[in-house]
Image (cartoon, rainbow, N blue to C red):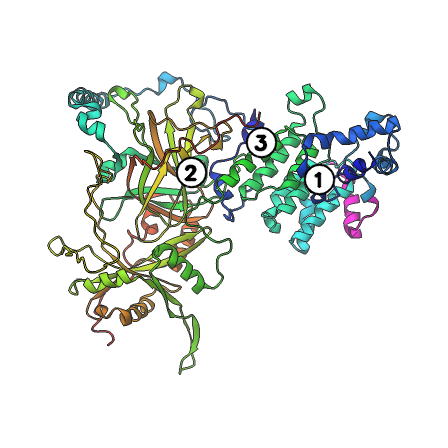
């Protein structure tokens, strides 16, 4: 089982297939077959003891929290009801039908940053740092930090060095999951300003089986660097399927009707400071693009 | 028949014959037939059908196992022959060492590398170590550990991006032994540790972005067979790597220019993204001896400006200042360079002048088209976002010394082509330069155990730092000319 997993290509490492990408030396120890279960919870660092608690012991009851929750959830419920009267997704029907593009995230003030989470390899014991803040005139999102690809010295982890920003899963009232429906679009449109480093865009869609919950669709985002903004259009057909960072043999097109999150990952093994400024993230319909899927879907490696 | 065998004997003779020879043989045919051919060769020999040349070749193959009586036993001993072990070209002292080592059972193979590393860490030495190991023992005892050790040592020897070295390491595996021979072996992991090791080797290749070649494939087929895990890994690499080989729309050449001025020129062209833009070298790096006898090193200054930027600058309101800002980082793979920009604040809303469109500016090419493109209701393809007006960028420059005096020189150089700069006040908004950043990084590494976020944020981020130079206003008119 483990062998089959490790023979898959790591998707971030595919960047190195771009010729002459100089990569840093990871320290490679003898391979230890990972014994992680198929369905797993949070990442547990090697050597960290298991949390010895029953699930009900983790529940914290608090009156104030309850009140806040009531307020939040009932407001959400109310908007859900009223939005129906306006039209689908809270927009008038005519607008919904004629929609050619949609701005999904733009950054206008500190509350827009609350829809995002950042994480780095610190949680596996690495030393990268990543921070998120608003840009100079509070109109953009500025992701910055340092990348450090020294692997943690725990004897098992062989690679390290990533920084990630990921949007939060949208939730309706009473913490029900809702999803983005982008099925009327075919292209992702971003306006970014980077510093020349390659990034990776990750899109997580809703899956049916629980073992697929780590399935993520990826593509690369190349920044030019410099003081100018850069408009990037990436067709959704280019996204390829990975599972826990390993690119899969049987590829499927990304189904756009239930999208959960979008994320940006940096892991190009160049140690040092990085920055990425995002103006907005949107989706649009590109009529010139007719490709359904960029990769072969027939059965390979029989 | 004879020809057939003599043709094939090139790769039946195992691995130490260079795989590049057999690679051409392999390309035409299915790999499976090659693997079976030694066997059928042996069968044929028992049948007495063989010609002389084939018999010779089999005889050569059988030399190691002349003690083995039965035919199927011979099959197991195809892996590299001691024929090479007799003619050792290894220096005697290594040989003695290796004899000594053999007595101890639990030696690490790192030792071998470290002994060599005392002399020189080169590719030749690395190859020599691999040779020593290969020739030490017919059975290649401990080859998995050796390969892991070698993989770890590769970056030290500077061979981590060398495909031939990887192939040589793969060659250490004995051939034919790990190929599953019946369906049960094929069903389960046959020799899992060895397969893991080979997968690890391929993963390291992948990690450094090296594409395996046909030699690697031949070796993998010889070692593990057609459908083993390393072979799968190889196929996956060969499937995905070429797909993404050229997707970078802003390619960076394999070797960055050595000369900093050339590098600066390349970077400026890359970030300016304008074919009209002109790169000017305002000053070359040189050392001068002043009258007092001191040596002064002059930094290089390379700038870029396009005609449209010059036009913007002439239209700039002279009462409002322009800013020199920087340094901003730019990454070219592993290299980080810094650049500075000359820009202005966005014009105030009342200052904005709508440029009247002049139809006679260009007669060949219409500058404005008023067509109803047959658009339907709602066919609006522009995004509904407010435009981010950050003010125009007038010029970009790169220098290796980001202090104010150097940048002043850049401005005065710019002034020759943009006379407006003489009347416009220039403000320097410089953050900590790269050197200072490095220093900060050093300090930071010293205090690594400090609690993170706030502290690091403070001394890290250029924007939040109290500006080193301060917002000193330097009137251009007060300075020169």
Mark identifier at residue A32: 3
Crowding at mark 1 (Cα within 10 Å: few <14, some 14-19, many 20+): some
Is residue B48 visible to the viewer in this orientation of the structure?
yes
Main secondary structure along the magenta-highlighted residues: helix
Host chain of mark 3: A
Asked if residue B76 can be seen in this view, the reply is no
* Chain letter of the residue beneath label 2 in the structure image: A
Left or right: B365 in relation to B273: left
Q: Residue at x 18, y 33 (%)?
A: B377
Q: Is residue A196 magenta?
A: no
Q: Where does label 2 land, which residue?
A: A122
Q: Secondary structure at mark 2?
A: helix
Tell me whether the residue at label 1 lies in contact with that at label 2, contact meaning CB atoms closer than 8 angstroms.
no
**Along the line of sight, the residue nearer the viewer: B390 or A297:** A297
Separation of residues labelled 3 and 2 (CA atoms): 21 Å
Question: Please, is residue B280 above or below residue B345 in the view?
Answer: below
Looking at the rendering, the stretch of residues picked out in magenta corresponds to: B85-105
**A12 on left or right of B12:** left
Label whose residue precedes the other's in the sequence (3 or 2): 3
| Disc 1: which residue | B25
- Mark 2 is surrounded, within 10 Å at the Cα level, by few (under 14), some (14 to 19) or many (20 or more) other residues, namely some
Residue drawn 46% across the image and 50% down it: B333
Instruction: Choose between B456 and B475: the one closer to the eye.
Output: B475
**Residue B102 magenta-drawn?**
yes
A61 up-or-down from B97: above or below: above
How far across and down, in percent of the image, does residue B284 sit?
Answer: 41, 70
């Amino acid at each position: 089982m483990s062998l089959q997993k490790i023979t898959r290509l790591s998707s971030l490492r595919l960047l190195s297939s771009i010729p002459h990408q100089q990569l840093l030396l990871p320290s490679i120890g003898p391979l230890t077959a990972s014994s992680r279960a198929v369905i797993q919870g949070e990442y547990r660092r090697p050597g960290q003891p298991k949390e010895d608690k029953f699930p009900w012991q983790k529940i914290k009851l608090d009156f104030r929290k309850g009140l806040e929750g009531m307020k939040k959830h009932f407001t959400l419920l109310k908007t859900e009801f009223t939005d129906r009267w306006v039209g689908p997704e809270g927009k008038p029907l005519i607008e919904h039908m004629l929609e050619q593009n949609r701005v999904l995230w733009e950054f206008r003030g500190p509350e827009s940053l609350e829809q995002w989470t950042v994480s780095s390899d610190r949680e596996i014991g690495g030393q990268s740092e990543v921070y998120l803040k608003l840009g100079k005139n509070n109109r953009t999102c500025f992701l910055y930090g340092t990348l450090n690809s020294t692997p943690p010295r725990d004897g098992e982890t062989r690679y390290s060095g990533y920084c990630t920003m990921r949007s939060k899963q949208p939730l309706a009232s009473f913490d029900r999951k809702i999803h983005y429906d982008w099925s009327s679009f075919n292209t992702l449109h971003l306006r970014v300003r980077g510093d020349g480093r390659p990034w990776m865009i990750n899109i997580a869609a809703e899956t049916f089986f629980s073992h697929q919950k780590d399935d993520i669709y990826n593509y690369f985002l190349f920044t030019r660097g410099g003081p100018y903004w850069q408009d990037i259009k990436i067709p959704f057909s280019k996204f390829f399927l990975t599972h826990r960072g390993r690119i899969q043999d049987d590829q499927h097109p990304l189904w756009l009707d239930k999208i959960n999150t979008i994320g940006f990952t940096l892991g190009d093994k160049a140690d040092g400071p990085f920055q990425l400024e995002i103006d907005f993230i949107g989706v649009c319909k590109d009529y010139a693009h007719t490709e359904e899927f960029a990769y072969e879907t027939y059965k390979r490696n029989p | 028949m004879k020809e057939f065998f003599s043709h094939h004997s090139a790769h039946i003779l195992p691995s130490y014959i260079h795989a590049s020879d057999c690679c051409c043989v392999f390309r035409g045919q299915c790999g499976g037939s090659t693997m079976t051919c030694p066997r059928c060769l042996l069968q044929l020999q028992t049948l007495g059908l063989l010609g002389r040349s084939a018999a010779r070749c089999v005889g050569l193959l059988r030399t190691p196992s002349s003690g083995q009586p039965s035919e199927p036993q011979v099959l197991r001993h195809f892996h590299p022959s001691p024929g090479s072990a007799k003619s050792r070209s290894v220096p005697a002292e290594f040989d003695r060492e290796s004899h000594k080592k053999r007595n101890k059972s639990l030696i690490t193979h790192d030792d071998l590398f470290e002994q060599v590393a005392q002399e020189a860490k080169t590719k030749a030495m690395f190859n020599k170590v691999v040779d020593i190991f290969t020739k030490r023992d017919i059975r290649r005892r401990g080859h998995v550990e050796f390969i892991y050790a070698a993989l770890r040592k590769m970056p030290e020897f500077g061979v981590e991006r060398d495909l031939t070295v990887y192939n040589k390491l793969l060659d250490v595996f004995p051939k034919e032994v790990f190929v599953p021979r019946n369906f049960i072996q094929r069903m389960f992991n046959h020799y899992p540790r060895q397969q893991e090791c080979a997968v690890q080797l391929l993963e390291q290749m992948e990690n450094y972005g090296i594409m395996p070649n046909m030699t690697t494939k031949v070796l993998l087929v010889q070692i593990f067979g057609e459908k083993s895990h390393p072979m799968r890994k190889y196929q996956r690499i060969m499937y995905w790597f070429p797909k993404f080989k050229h997707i970078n729309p802003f390619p960076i050449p394999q070797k960055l220019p050595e000369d900093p001025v050339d590098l600066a020129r390349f970077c400026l062209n890359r970030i300016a993204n304008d074919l009209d833009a002109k790169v000017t070298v305002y000053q070359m790096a040189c050392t001068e001896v002043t009258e007092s006898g001191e040596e002064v090193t002059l930094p290089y200054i390379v700038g870029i400006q396009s005609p449209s930027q010059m036009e913007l600058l002439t239209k700039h309101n002279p009462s409002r200042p322009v800013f020199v800002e920087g340094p901003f980082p730019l990454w070219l793979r592993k290299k980080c360079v810094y650049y500075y920009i000359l820009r202005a604040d966005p014009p105030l809303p009342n200052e904005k002048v709508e440029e009247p469109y002049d139809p006679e500016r260009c007669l060949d090419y219409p500058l404005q088209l008023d067509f109803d493109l047959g658009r339907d209701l709602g066919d609006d393809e522009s995004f509904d976002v407010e435009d981010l007006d950050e003010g125009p960028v007038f010029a970009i420059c790169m220098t290796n010394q980001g202090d104010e005096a150097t940048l002043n020189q850049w401005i005065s150089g710019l002034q020759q082509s943009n006379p407006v700069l003489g009347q416009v006040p220039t403000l320097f908004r410089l953050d900590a330069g790269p050197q200072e950043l490095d220093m900060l990084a050093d300090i930071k590494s010293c205090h690594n155990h400090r609690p993170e976020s706030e502290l690091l944020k403070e001394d890290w981020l250029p924007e939040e730092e109290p500006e080193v130079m301060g917002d000193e206003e330097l009137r251009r008119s007060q300075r020169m000319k």
